[in-house]
Amino acid sequence: MTMTPHNLLANVTAGKVIYTTNSGVQVCGDSLDILPQLPANSVDLIVTSPPFPLLRQKEYGNEDQHAYVDWLVSFAKAAKDALKETGSLVIDIGGAYQRGRPVRSLHQYRVLIALVDDLGYQLAEEFYWHNPAKLPSPIEWVNKRKIRVKDSVNTVWWLSKTDFPKVSLDSVRVPYSESMRRLLKNPESYYRPKVRDSGHSIGKAFGLDNGGALPSNLLSYPNSDSNGFYIRTCKELGLRSHPARFPAALPEFFIKMLTHQNDFVLDIFGGSNTTGHVAEILGRKWLSIEKSHEYAALSGVRFLEGKPLPEIREIHRAIVTGEGPKL
């Protein structure tokens, strides 16, 4: 039997199905309850952005910095059995300052160390997501006192169960620079194969056209979708959109790099279900788990682009009232 989100959930009693699509299922519930009920070795990729440990409580739920590490590690522990041996866990974690001090918290690094040392995950590679559109923050240290620069980079940990998880870098190649394109036209005029002073060996393969350059671990994606379909439609419906969303480009990068067609992608902190929507577009199976019924239901809007507003309103009503429609 082909594994799908629908039969994957056959024996799951925790959580409630909010809506389904051709490729995925949105569930409302606590991931700590649902994860242990998923079949072992069934998930190819977990990509998620958990609520950050902010100093002020947010409406979408966040933990105190001191309790954050144990809290997040508990989810990673519950997720490990469901993850395939070749699977990956990708976690986007933002930084924060300590209360009342211009000194950074180390929570995201403590989480990483706990996941590796205590749970046995491997750090395949660390990534950094740069959001050039992020507003200056925190206000006290950046805007008022002007003693710190704008914080616009999140850490993103790519973790795996083994040293050699599934990965396809050709799927995320980027366009060559202008100078590299000139080199590829006439490699001999640019360099001769030899060992450089640094010890790097520049061979003939350096002049091969691979269809694009390998990306770096610095990912620069603006989080500026204020006029995107999801935000715009939420406003037209008179509803509050989820306040903490990562750009579609972020899960897209990791889904392309770490999964193949029809592989299974899971987001354990679904939010507005950016991950599920991207997975659907890329031809992956997906499951999104979100604790808030309000946000889980509203995330269905992402799959209704092209439909007239009255129809979207009616479908959203059906989702909210528990009819669990297929979108």
Image (spheres, grey):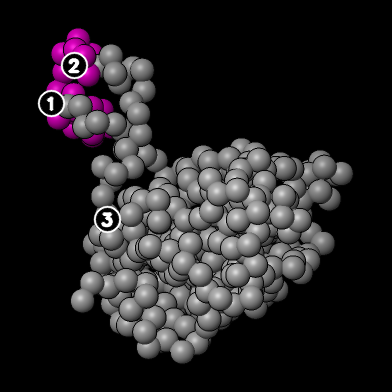
Residue 187 is tagged as 2
On the picture, is 146 further left or further right than 235? right
- Rate crowding at label 3 as few (under 14), some (14 to 19) or many (20 or more) other CA atoms within 10 Å: few
Report helix, strand or loop for mark 2. helix
Residue 79 colored magenta?
no
- Which residue sits at x=18%, y=24%? 207
In this orientation, does residue 103 appear?
no
Number of the front mark, 2 or 3: 3
Report helix, strand or loop for mark 1. helix
Figure check: 150 above or below 80: above
Q: Position of residue 48 (x, y in %)?
A: 49, 63
Q: Position of residue 5 (x, y in %)?
A: 37, 72
Residue type of the residue flagged with mark 3? Gln
Bounds of the magenta segment? 184-207
- Which residue sits at x=55%, y=49%? 307
Q: Position of residue 76 (x, y in %)?
A: 46, 75
- Which residue sits at x=47%, y=56%? 277
Q: Position of residue 39 (x, y in %)?
A: 32, 82
CA–CA distance in space, label 2 to label 1: 9 Å
On the picture, is 122 further left or further right than 273? left
CA–CA distance in space, label 3 to label 1: 33 Å
**Label 3: which residue?**
261
Q: Report if the CB atoms under discs 2 and 1 are less than 8 Å apart.
A: yes
Residue type of the residue flagged with mark 2? Pro
- Nearer-N-terminus badge (2/1): 2
- Nearer-N-terminus badge (3/1): 1
**Label 1: which residue?**
204
Residue 167 is tagged as none
Closest to the observer: 211 or 28? Answer: 28
In this orientation, does residue 115 appear?
yes
The part of the image, by quadrant, that contains residue 133 is top right
Report helix, strand or loop for mark 3. loop
